[in-house]
Image: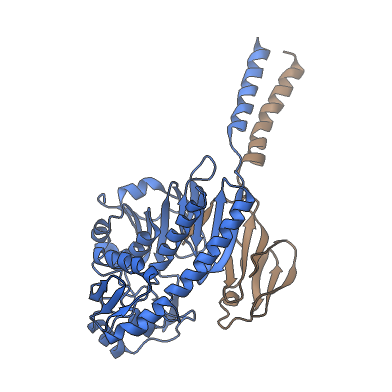
Chain colours: A brown, B blue
Amino acid sequence: MTRTDYIVVILALCALPWLYIKFWTMDETAVNVIISTHDNKKIILPLSENKTINVKGPLGENIIEIKDNKARFINSPCPNKICIHSGWLEDINDIAACLPNGVSVSIGGKHQEFDAINF
Amino acid sequence: MLRSRVIVVLFSLTLLLSACSRQPETHNQRLLVFGTIIDISIVGVDKKTADNAFKVIEEDFNYMHEAWHAWQPGALGRINNLLPTTARFSTAPSLIPVIEKATQLSQQSNGLFNPAIGNLIRAWGFHSDELPTQLPDKNTITELVKQQPKMSDLELNGIKLRSRNPAMRLDMGAFVKGYGIDMAIEHLQELGINNAIINAGGDLRAIGQKGDRPWRIGVRHPRNNSILASIEIQNNESIFTSGDYERFFDHNNKRYHHVIDPRTGYPADKTTSVTIIHSDGATADAAATALFIAGPEQWHKIAKQMNIKYVMLIDKQGHVYMNPAMQKRIQFVTDTKPEITITKPL
């Protein structure tokens, strides 16, 4: 083997851990907001983009705010306002829902370590 | 020679990477039915089959919600209107297996899981979607406890039902989620789906597995939003947790939660959460409530009676109690591991 061969082999070996981390490990960073509507439609939006969304349901309109990598309900036509009281959602699998209006908001990531969360 | 060895090593390492499998295609659907959020994941079928299954399951849960609600017009609502008369009446046949299963589980739990205390649940205000804000009247609670309604007060003969105790009202809240998930899983299997998970508001049952690996479940910490532990399940297992954080209100700086001890009429106060792994969801659901009420001293005995093989109980101080079989299946993922007591085998 020539000196260049050794360099190529060393570089290839060094690249292996990087390749492993890049392609085979879980990226647990929260990246998007998943909004489910009463007619089972899904709206997926980036968590990084500040935005306010109006979502219609049988009772009226829910307003959802995405700000500073967090999301929350800010207005709801439901009687108890449990969705608004849930506050900010920011971690993967955080979820809030307006059951009477059929609207839910959750936080998703590129990869999720768990298939379901028990609580 | 050296060159060929290096090539062999590099080739082997590349093979090792390719041996890791990618996730199989999973069809996910979120439904807001049954008074909760239901997440369904289906693996190993085409999109059309999965979409059809989602529709069927949604209809199932809508039907069950209407039929099994204790305080709304529906099959169980009608039963609750008729039970105080103590006269015999015809009941909806679809509710008979639900009542029979609930009765059996109630007896196995020494009455700690007691769906007959609907009046007590209503006195606390935990029967409706809206959370209570104040304590019930002390005398009302004392009176309701004294009446001691229990499942064995029911007389079921064919489709004819009566209660010997006029104070009985059936509230299946601690049980129907599990029973409903069982029915939905059964329906999925009838549709030819063998790998799926149904998660109803944090309580779930899984069949088959996810591709070539078991389903991975994260158990949430009872006191914050982080994941406390992970459990792998496959081939038809349920994980159910009862916790004091699910439905509660604060009054004079004290937390009053929805798991009412039928013996005292007040929320069970020695437990923070109980997690159960069991094959069927109905048993897991009822056992999670019964063992929560039983508390750190009595849960082992009740679990044995209910034939539960995997239990984790966290007491008010954050101390974890587990049987050895559960210890083998659970992995804590928090930075600081809680204090753990391993009990005798179940």
Front residue of B251/A103: it is A103
Front residue of B108/A75: it is B108
| Residue B285 visible to the viewer | yes
Quarter of the view holding residue B251: bottom left
Front residue of B120/B245: it is B120
Exactly how many numbered labels are in the figure?
A: 0
Q: Is residue B344 left or right of residue B5?
A: left
Q: Residue B186: give x, y in percent of width and height.
A: 45, 55
- Farthest-out residue, top: B1
Q: Residue B325: give x, y in percent of width and height.
A: 33, 47
Name the residue located 38 percent from the left edge and 86 percent from the top edge. Answer: B135
Quarter of the view holding residue A65: bottom right
User: From the viewer's perspective, is residue A61 above or below residue B31?
Assistant: below
Front residue of B202/B14: it is B202
| Residue B227 visible to the viewer | no
Q: Residue B26: give x, y in percent of width and height.
A: 60, 49
User: From the viewer's perspective, is residue B52 above or below residue A63?
Assistant: above
Quarter of the view holding residue B167: bottom left
User: From the viewer's perspective, is residue B17 above or below residue B284?
Assistant: above
Q: Is residue A23 left or right of residue B331?
A: right
Q: Residue A23: give x, y in percent of width and height.
A: 66, 40
Looking at the rendered image, the quarter that the N terminus of chain B falls into is top right
Name the residue located 25 percent from the left edge and 50 percent from the top edge. Answer: B344
- Farthest-out residue, right: A4
Q: Is residue B221 left or right of residue B139?
A: right
